[in-house]
Amino acid sequence: MQFGIFSVSDITRDPVSRETPTEAERIDAVVKIAQKAEETGFDVFAIGEHHNPPFFSSSPTTLLAYIAGSTTNLILTTATTLITTNDPVRIAEEYAMLQHLSKGRMDLMLGRGNTAPVYPWFGQDIRQGLPLALESYNLLHRLWREDVVDWEGKFRTPLQGFTSIPRPLDDVPPFVWHGSIRTPEIAEQAAYYGDGFFANNIFWPKEHYIRLIRFYRQRFEHYGHGTAKQAIVGLGGQAYVAKKSQDAKREFRPYFDQAPVYGHGPSMEDFMDLTPLSVGSPQEVIDKTLTFREHFGDYQRQLFLIDHAGLPLATVLRQLDLLGEEVIPVLRKEIAARQDPQTPAAPTHASLVTAKYGDSAPRQPRPNANRGDNVTGGSPYEDSAAQASYPRL
């Protein structure tokens, strides 16, 4: 099981200090949070993608590449990358570059995005969001697996003899999660390709996510990628922890009460009962998180949202200390003891390389200098013929 944190990159007024961080302060803070996550024993750090205030993360690959340079083991990912308003060619190039720079310590989560004004900023129509997502991912999937792509679709110009550069590290595409809050179509897309499905698992009751994950597992098996239990599932969650339960509730309440994402609706206690939100002692957070497996079955990745709603950096860093020292080690032990031994581990670059090549050396694409500008229209890679002998991922 991989444990990590994710940030939606919001810039929110602190209801206690009444101060709002600047963009520069918030960007600096999230780098420190990622570095602290590695220091305290987390496996994964994820950042969202947004192109509108009050968020700052418009360039996830830039941010994650910087974090990769200051960490050693942390897996870096997104939550999410917008497959609809980004050109899939640029996604293919930018995330392959991140894969190289991080030495494979990355994957990415794709999503449609639900902020209507963003679509026309990038020349798209939110009413076409679903077919756009399906078509764009079909192209991205091919760009990472074929040296030369001929392609034609509805939402972008055709490609003829196109090669996305750089080629994926070891000629193994990054692992892809498809992230969803509520739509079964995204679960269907993940299942079709045999990719991972990340259920947001915040804001909504467990029954909603139970239906989504069950549907994904069924379709994963339907498409022949393995049994339903072998499907790759990730979950979100929200947590605020303190040594004593009453302290956690007292400290987090003003942030909950004023956070725009909660909509000034149910009380914090009601929200905790209805959703995966955990506010309490380390044992209470452990107990709540262990129920996720009971509801959804064995899964591979658990990410916590802990830096939202205006919480100051110092508080978030203390949260990481408490979670890293008193919560995550217990969860690792308890989940390992309860997990079906046949449950697959979360995919990593190393595991994907082994799955593709076995004991053989990975393919290392090299542009064929002998072909000049490749005017013949063939592959620009001298060892492309050898590629056919390896199974496609």
Image: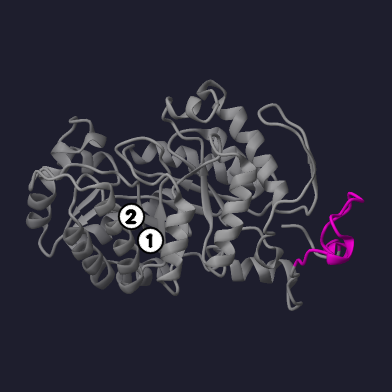
- Residue 63 seen in this snapshot: yes
Q: Quadrant of residue 269?
A: top left
> Which residue has dot 1 on it?
4
Magenta-colored segment: predominant secondary structure? loop
Residue found at x 44% / y 34%: 182
Depicted 366 relative to depicted 184: above or below: below
Counting residues from the start of the chain, the first of labels 2 and 1 encountered is: 1
Which quarter of the rendering shows the N terminus?
A: bottom left
Residue found at x 9% / y 43%: 18
Q: Is residue 393 left or right of residue 322?
A: right
User: Percent position (x, y) of residue 19?
Assistant: 12, 45
- Magenta segment: 365-388
User: Percent position (x, y) of residue 266?
Assistant: 18, 32
Which quarter of the rendering shows the C terminus?
A: bottom right
Residue found at x 49% / y 25%: 120
Q: Amino acid at mark 2?
A: Phe
> Which residue has dot 2 on it?
304
Query: Could you say which is closer to the camera, residue 292 or residue 175?
Result: 175
